[in-house]
Amino acid sequence: MKLTNLLTSAAVALGLAAGAAMADTTKVGFVYVGPVGDGGWTYEHDQGRKAVEAEFGDQVETVYVENVAEGPDAERVMTQMALEGADLIFTTSFGYMDPTINVAKKFPNVKFEHATGYKRADNVSTYSARFYEGRAVQGTIAGHMTESNIIGYIGSYPIPEVIRGINSAYLHAKKVNPDVQFKIVWAFTWFDPAKEADAAKVLIEQGADVILQHTDSTAPQAAAQAAGNVITFGQASDMSEYAPKPRVSSIIDDWAPYYIARTKAVIDGTWESVDTWDGIGAGMVGIGEISDVVPADVKAAALAIKDAQANGTYHAFTGPINKQDGSAWLAEGETADDGTLAGMNFYVEGIEGDIPQ
């Protein structure tokens, strides 16, 4: 009888200890628009998740759901994560904005972090990177290296983030090559290798010998490689398996420091709703190694643009710049304010075609 009581007491003690341990574990969820193996956007977000695990060990438990469509399906996934005890949920695509806000209202004690959006609440933060700074570097290389003077650009959706990138790349290509033209194909997807490959092939057929992309797969790299005389840039991740050509450099999204800092804030009880928009200087936007296919003087010019943006001596949108219709936007030496950039819905002068509605 005494032995039974001892065993029972021990089991209760172990159960209490396990419960305390569970209570001390912070559960962090991630909602992904593509597969973790996309080689681009979602891959880099998942590297950030793994960095959280490595940083905090048994203090955290991370969970994720990949290939979540933007819209009602996203709201269902977020709700399920919250019901299953997530303390912090990162929602990593622009189209998750309204679902994030909706679910956050139902779970006021859960912290939410939405990537690339602009709607916040007491328990919802927003975060993004100044990808347009990386586009300035890419545009500089592209303008120097095109022989056809035609640069192709694969757009995902016509939202300010994507439009900023097109404008930045164009301005910096035009700065070093006044004869350059941009041809833009809208894929209306973040991740669809078949559509992305088709978009690249269309641009190549139109004479583009440089392809930039704001979509998430490596399919445009493969299409360019097959064409043989086209160069590309890695998007969101290094895509170095296609180096030294067609991929001659890349924009790399480094989310790990942000994810670690925000998880720590939840653990410490210091989390607050904030808006974060960092770039090259803060390390959120990285520039992948520029391959030896790029001439040394072009590489030096690109790195100079990178360094100037990093140290704050240069802004990618510095006047004089007109809008597409010829109206003045920025005067000589004037730089764009964040509010205008955040809502950018126009092309700059020289880009042909209309922005889809």
Image: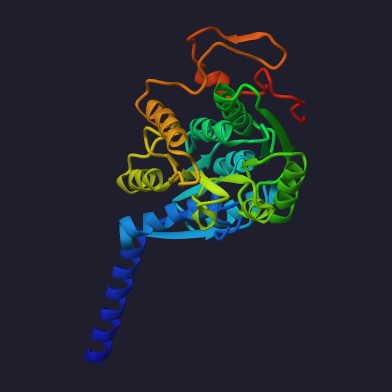
Q: Is residue 98 above or below residue 327?
A: below
Residue 146: % across, % down? 61, 36
Q: Position of residue 59 (x, y in %)?
A: 32, 59
Quadrant where the N terminus sits is: bottom left
Where is residue 211 drawn, in percent x and y?
Answer: 64, 42
Image colouring: rainbow
Q: With 329 as the anchor, is 356 left or right in this view?
A: right
Image quarter (top left, top right, bottom left or bottom right) of the C terminus: top right
Residue 266 visible in rendering:
yes
Where in the figure is residue 81, as x and y percent of width and height?
54, 56
Instruction: Pick the residue in front: 287 or 285.
Output: 287
Relative depth, front residue between 91 and 182:
182
Note whether 335 is above or below 300 in the view shown: above
Looking at the image, residue 180 sits to the left or right of residue 304; the answer is: right
- Return the residue nearer the eye: 161 or 171: 171
What is the number of callouts on the image? 0
Residue 59 in view of the camera: no
Quarter of the figure with residue 66: bottom right
Please report the residue visible at 55 percent of the width from the left and 49 percent of the height from the top.
247
Residue drawn where x is 77% and y is 39% of the image: 206
Front residue of 94/324: it is 324
In screen coordinates, is 257 left or right of 115? left
Please tell me whether residue 301 is drawn above or below residue 100 in the rendered image.
above
Residue 279 quadrant: top left
Residue at image location 58% in from the left, 51% down from the top: 78
